[in-house]
Amino acid sequence: MPADLPKSRAPSIRDVARLAGVSHQTVSRVLNNHPSIRDSTKAKVQQVMDDLQYRPNRAARALSRGTSRTIGVLSASSSQYGPASSIAAIQDAAREAGYYVNTANLTAVDPESIEAALDHLMLQSVEGIVVIAPQMRVFDVLEQLSISVPYVTLQSTGGLNDHGLSVDQIAGARLATRHLIDLGHRNIYHLAGPQDWIEAEARMRGFLDEMGAMDVPTTAPILGDWTADFGYYAGRELLRVRDFTAIFSSNDQMALGLMHAIRDAGLDIPGDISVVGFDDIPESAHFWPPLTTVRQDFAELGRRCMDLLLDDITAGPVVDRSAIIPTLIVRSSTGPPAF
Amino acid sequence: MPADLPKSRAPSIRDVARLAGVSHQTVSRVLNNHPSIRDSTKAKVQQVMDDLQYRPNRAARALSRGTSRTIGVLSASSSQYGPASSIAAIQDAAREAGYYVNTANLTAVDPESIEAALDHLMLQSVEGIVVIAPQMRVFDVLEQLSISVPYVTLQSTGGLNDHGLSVDQIAGARLATRHLIDLGHRNIYHLAGPQDWIEAEARMRGFLDEMGAMDVPTTAPILGDWTADFGYYAGRELLRVRDFTAIFSSNDQMALGLMHAIRDAGLDIPGDISVVGFDDIPESAHFWPPLTTVRQDFAELGRRCMDLLLDDITAGPVVDRSAIIPTLIVRSSTGPPAF
DNA sequence: CGTTTGAATGTGCACGGTCACAAATGTGGC
DNA sequence: GCCACATTTGTGACCGTGCACATTCAAACG
């Protein structure tokens, strides 16, 4: 019976080397697929590695190589559908590329907690950072801190820096707005996201741009907080005046709340009021009525973002930085205005 | 002007030592809050560390200590609301405890990808693993692989092992079922989750238990896939016969789809059919009608789970392993049956 | 057959911390 | 002033891997 007792320490390359009758460097070469290794040697070493259930020690490798093969994700509101989908895609892409992912959540958006989260990531010597914290303020802090590793963001600030990759939110918002205008609506409200959020800002701009381009008079957008709850209360307030026939909501959740309020007021959707959302979360198709919305491919975004970062890290080939154009999904929550 | 040129390498503990006029070991002691360090020395060292913007190298520390201060999260379906919330809570709790978190997503539930994900985590020498992959099969594989680090799961299999901590799904399901029975329903369907999922199984058992306890005849549960889409199609099928007055859905998304189908059939909720969900996702309050459901505190679950794991790792004090009891949230999707 | 060349393998050290132990320094009692 | 003792600091080895360089070996060439 082989001495299979649980050794106190895990086997190292030297253990493997000794048993295989080679030097530790040869084992290292096998590990790293060095070209000049005799096949027989390679096989022998690999055999011993299997027998010993050898696993390279990541810390040692990182130390010696000076590289951690780890990337960090700085995320806010990671429990929401969009960010969560992107994070998952990022993790998959990273793993496929042989990278590890470490996530730090932002508990608040004040500079202190941003710095704390960043510190947490830097302490792990991440080689790059993906920022999925869509608040403007996060970007400001990032700029100031002058981080020593490359970083990319899921939300482009629109050309101010080249760290961004993003769905073209403006185009998406214009799509939604145009849809309402084409249906004949002229009194359209926009329920925007928090002013601080990049997507909120971009969607608002898209809305205003399209309204301007089509020469439709605009009212000031309402600033919400993305939640269905807010959508509901905003809807209640808006309906006290009821000087509109359509609303474009910055995300699906608020649209849901809006529709709730509209129904509560005894009005019909889309008969009395049309509603458009943004995101196309999987539930939107089953809202009442099924929500017309703008679809974003969050997973694709995550993957592309990862490509971009890996490119920055390895200074590799130029990758596709073109924006992803979202698509309009027309369902039953929109129709021509009543007269 | 000080020589502030960007050195090719980051400052090490020895650089700090040299500038502070002490030995590297003294610097190490300052880093680790060793008790016997003269205050003046400590201050001096800290000053130099600040000046140099010194950051301890995690890899080196992990290597020499033989401990990585990293825990792994093995997760499936991490973009769904529940798991995502729990993961976020776990990350926060870990960071607070000075641990790093590394996540591996399961792309599929076959043994190969489970093993691959686990491998990915083990390669990083994680000290513990949190499993948020709620499929039974994952547990089987975990048992077989006989992992060398402690692990805990968010979904208890119910006493077969002691790795679990969970919301008492059975109690929650009984709450929901009892609510329907108390309202006077006697023909109640259950739309369950995928058979392989632990929660699905537990909720189904809760449903059957309560029905049995109250002496209400039961029909076989329908097995769904958690999506609103499935809820919709299941609803369409069920309504062809329409031999029931209430449905208890295993989660809120399927309940949403169900309600969609019920409305499509021209029926009233809860007038004709009552619907209960499970989870209380933030949108449920704004469904049409607002959904009666069972609330789970995912974040609390994540935190408690982390406590449990850290306890296992450090062999610390016994922590609270009591199950979390979910609560019933009554809204407008349930009412007495029509006669 | 000696020389050149390239592939295959070995040697020793570096990476940046921590640990065990030794040494120096300070403190109090007699 | 000397000893016992606690506190503070220093020395050197070590963790597991990769790198630079040295060495061995085999084949090819003149």
Image: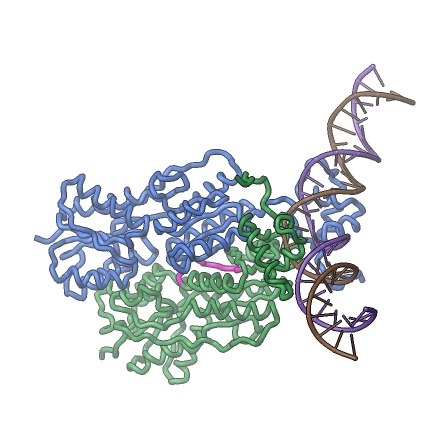
Chain colours: A green, B blue, C purple, D brown
Q: Is A74 part of what is drawn in magenta?
A: yes
Q: Position of residue B43 (x, y in %)?
A: 73, 44
Between residue B156 and residue D23, name the one nearer to us. Answer: D23
Relative vertical location of residue A203 with respect to residue B320 in this rendering, above or below: below
Start and end of the magenta stretch? Answer: A73-81
Q: Quadrant of the C terminus of chain A?
A: bottom left
Q: Position of residue B267 (x, y in %)?
A: 14, 62
Residue drawn at the location 34% of the way across and 61% of the way down:
A228
Q: Is residue A134 left or right of residue B37?
A: left
Quarter of the view holding residue B2: bottom right
Q: Position of residue A244 (x, y in %)?
A: 30, 74
Quarter of the view holding residue A274: bottom left
Q: Is residue D24 left or right of residue A158?
A: right
Residue drawn at the location 38% of the way across and 56% of the way down:
B110
Residue drawn at the location 17% of the way across and 44% of the way down:
B182
Between residue B130 and residue C26, name the one nearer to us. Answer: B130
